[in-house]
Amino acid sequence: MALPWYKQFWPWFLIILPATVVFWTITTVILFTQNSVHLVTEDYYKKGKGINVDISKVQVANDLGLSATVRSERNQILFKFDKGNLEHYPAITAMFAHRTLPDRDFTSLITSDANGLYRLNLDSELQGPWFIELSPHDQQWLIQGRVGFPSESTIELTN
């Protein structure tokens, strides 16, 4: 006497194979949509025009003799700023951009002590590659560079 189909092994085996593929495909799609990596900017034309403006600001920083170095100590980022021909150490806007995760980007206004040391206290230690831009409140000049954190050694921000 033959068993009904739902009590046999082979129909369930043949149903389980495509069902597992469908399950893992849906899981993969959900993971990639929630954790997407943004490598291409959507407004590339405006971004390209902005690069030309940045180059002129970098040239102003070079003409003024400005330079900066950066290092990290646990949850603190330390910038040593050489003010060059400036009269005083200005308040600086520091923009941190992660290479592939734009939701982690942040900007902070920092001030210096009398020696030109700027301290930025963070909630947690920075990890991975970051692009840093330093500029004053009037946006007249720009110092920028790439840094890998954590970095106990001093890294020069090179335009």
Image (spheres, rainbow, N blue to C red):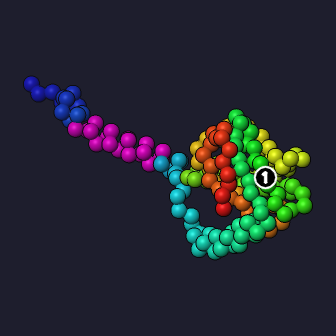
Residue 13 highlighted magenta (yes or no): no
User: From where the camera sits, is residue 46 visible?
Assistant: no
Quadrant in the picture for residue 138: bottom right
Identify the residue position indicated by label 1 in the image: 81
Image quadrant where one finds the C terminus: bottom right
Q: Locate residue 97 relative to residue 25 in the image: left or right.
A: right
Residue 25 highlighted magenta (yes or no): yes
Q: Locate residue 41 relative to residue 73 in the image: left or right.
A: left
Q: Locate residue 83 relative to residue 28 in the image: left or right.
A: right
Residue 121 x/y as whole percent: 77, 40
Residue 137 x/y as whole percent: 83, 61
Q: Nearer the viewer, residue 96 or 104?
A: 96
Which residue ends up furthest to the left in the rendered image? 1
Seen in the picture, residue 56 relative to 7 is either above or below; the reply is: below
Q: Residue at x 38, y 41 (%)?
A: 23
Q: Residue at x 18, y 33 (%)?
A: 10
Quadrant in the picture for residue 52: bottom right
Q: Locate residue 117 relative to residue 58 in the image: left or right.
A: right
Q: Residue at x 60, y 72 (%)?
A: 48
Within-10-Å neighbours for mark 1: few <14, some 14–19, many 20+: many
Q: Nearer the viewer, residue 38 or 81?
A: 81
User: From where the camera sits, is residue 74 visible?
Assistant: yes
Q: Which portion, as a residue range, is magenta?
A: 14-31
Residue at disc 1, secondary structure:
strand
Magenta stretch: dominant SS? helix
Residue 155 x/y as whole percent: 66, 48
